Image (tube, rainbow, N blue to C red):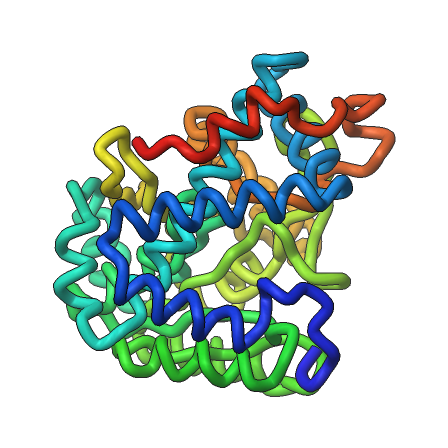
Amino acid sequence: MAGSKVKNSLYSLRAFKAAFALAHFLPRPAAQALAAFVGRIAYRRKADAQAAIHANLQLVTGLTGTALDALCAENVGNFSRMLADYFLCVGTAADRHCDALIESWSGWGNLAAAREAGRGTIVVTGHLGHWELGGLVLARRGLPLTVITAEEPSTGLTRWREACRRRLGIKTITVGPGHPFAFVEMLQTLRRNEFLAMLVDRPYAGSGAPVRLFGHATEFSTAPALLAQHTGAAVLPAFVLRQPSGRYLSVAEPVVPMTGTADRRADLVANTQRVATAFESIIRQHPAQWFNYVPIWSPAESPAPPPPAMTQSSVGMVGRLR
């Protein structure tokens, strides 16, 4: 909530500015190693995050014990290094850094075809890979892009991140309490045949519909399905995934077909499920890059009891550079 007290000192305007400065001062390998170290320490202090990521990834993969510990350690390392790259890519030399970080592209034709339809394109992604870099990639290719975001923990941080995006040619629409016209802005963006990008795998309260993900109940954002109902916009999943080289693959998937019947409420639920189903394959292939440190499934759906905190041996894996 804007103006609220920041409880996490690492998720504050001061911390973001410090990380930004370090990312542009240190060589990338050193920044990646430092980020992994800080992430490892922060993670060890968060028992709730440890329990959540263990439960989430156990349900996705079926792993237990040391194998699950190792996967969680790899996940934390990937998340930390992704954040280091985020700070590298929001400065004045973003174009150069973006070109250096993108190893290859897949699915550009899917984006082009969606735009040619002329009704706007809703780019849906999740807390997977490097989603902020994905927005930069689209903007760098000349696509008119607006991203949907919630308020940051402080007004200052909200404005800082919005300014970073604006400098890179990306517009922002903030949703949630205090932003009653956000949906109208989204409709206008799509009716101009522009691109609207949003995270959908962790909706804020009251904005999701029940879906089955990996055979268990959770919620996905209804925004893509609802916007598609009003505009006929294409709904297209896209992801930016870290590769063994330490660089990234940008992937644009085929458009998700939307059902349209007289029962618009049923369509909303069915189409939200279609989006969730489209995410399953890529999450299953890249569980070490699905960064959800909060419970995704209800306690009744999640494995129990949660695994213990990471062992010293698995924690040590986080610091290794790829």
Left or right of 11: which side holds 318? left
Examine the image and state in which quarter residue 90 appears. Answer: bottom left
Left or right of 108: which side holds 15? right
Does residue 119 lie above or below 62 as drawn?
A: below
Q: Residue at x 38, y 60 (%)?
A: 132
- Where residue 78 sits: x, y (%)? 43, 39
Q: Residue at x 73, y 68 (%)?
A: 7
Q: Residue at x 40, y 44 (%)?
A: 129
Does residue 233 lie above or below 242 as drawn?
A: below
- Where residue 75 sits: x, y (%)? 50, 34
Of residues 246 and 137, which is closer to you in this image? 246
Q: Residue at x 22, y 54 (%)?
A: 27
Answer whether residue 128 is visible to the viewer in this image.
Answer: no
Answer whether residue 263 is visible to the viewer in this image.
Answer: yes
Left or right of 75: which side holds 81? left
For the image shown, how many numbered marks are present on the structure? 0
Of residues 243 and 217, which is closer to you in this image? 243
Of residues 63 and 40, which is closer to you in this image? 40
Examine the image and state in which quarter residue 225 appears. Answer: bottom right
Of residues 211 and 319, which is closer to you in this image? 319
Point out the image quarter for the N terminus.
bottom right
Examine the image and state in which quarter residue 289 appears. Answer: top left
Point out the image quarter for the C terminus.
top left
- Where residue 155 sits: x, y (%)? 60, 85
Does residue 159 lie above or below 206 as drawn?
A: below
- Where residue 201 sits: x, y (%)? 58, 48
